[in-house]
Image (cartoon, grey):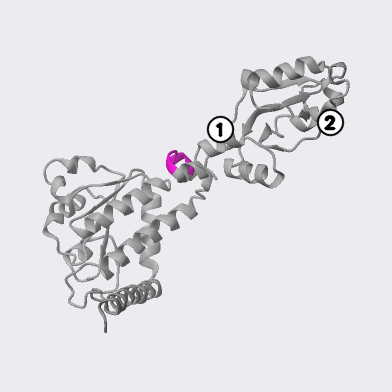
Amino acid sequence: MSGSEHFLATARQVVTDEARALDALAAGFDERFADAVRLILKAEGRVIVSGIGKSGHIGRKIAATLASTGTPAHFVHPAEASHGDLGMLSKGDVVLAISNSGEAPELANLLVFTRRFDIPLIGLSSRPESTLMTQADVQLEIPALGEACGYGIVPSISTTLTLAMGDALAIAIMKHRDFRPENFRDFHPGGKLGARLSKVRDLMHGGDALPLVAENSPMSEALLEISQKGFGVAGVSGADNALTGIITDGDLRRHMDGLLSQTAADVMTSSPTTIGPDALAEEALAVMNARKITCLFVVDATQGPQALGLIHIHDCLRAGLG
């Protein structure tokens, strides 16, 4: 077997072993998992996640996932906990302690603290007879299937299972709380994910920046509005301030003959495509691309048909969409 073939064979073996372990984990879920979910849901405080070594790295990710999906959570390093960070724990919190062996000595003070002050403890380990699991109020057990290296010395299968257990917890809690994409965006305002979850109201131009004229406005005023606001369009409002039309470059070309003698109502395209302020900006971009237009007026149908703002395709691109 050549070097490349050997590398690829090893890669496939590792992933296959971990996939089989995940199947075993899924098959082993029982009422203890539901108990852990209920314990976290009932907590008035935060989920304090702790672990040492690779378990600590996975624990940080679990805490971050919980926090980003609406469950207040922090990671506390067990060694630091012994030097003052135990003060971060309080009544109402729940502790999720992670140790594959269940015997990490660094967790000892944390376990004692939870027992002394009656703080609920969830243990996550592959050894049900370990100190961690026997002390825990709820035991989350991962299958003891060795490691992908074949020697039991490189955390791989065990860390994959631990991470999957944490993801399962976070998502089960998230779904129970009906945590939706619009909520998720509040915890992820930056980066590509934040851009994808941005709402139209976050990017739209409103107030004095909104290009808007009345139906009876002469086209000289409409042209000035289009020029000053810089979006290449103007919205047209009726007597009740409802958005009744839009004037675009195409409308101007179609009415060049005697343009300045006409009103905005004469030139506008009626019933323009609009979007709501709470729609995702990604949806606005999709509409603009599908209709081959560069902007949309924003109208909140629940508050009447008045134009609240305008979103331009460039706003979406600057935000990282597209």
Numbered disc in front, either 2 or 1: 2
Residue drawn 84% across the image and 26% down it: 267
Q: Secondary structure at mark 2?
A: helix
How many C-alpha atoms fall within 10 Å of the one at disc 2: few (<14), some, or many (≥20)?
few
Q: Secondary structure at mark 1?
A: helix
Badge 1 is on which residue? 203
Figure quadrant of residue 146: bottom left
Residue drawn 37% across the image and 61% down it: 35
Q: Is residue 179 left or right of residue 133?
A: right
The amino acid pointed to by label 1 is Leu
The magenta segment is: 185-191
- Distance between mark 2 and mark 1 Cα atoms: 31 Å
Q: Position of residue 91 (x, y in %)?
A: 27, 43
Q: Where is the C terminus found, in terms of image quarters?
A: top right
Specify whether residue 107 is painted magenta. Answer: no
Badge 2 is on which residue? 254
Q: Is residue 289 left or right of residue 217?
A: left
Residue drawn 74% across the image and 19% down it: 223
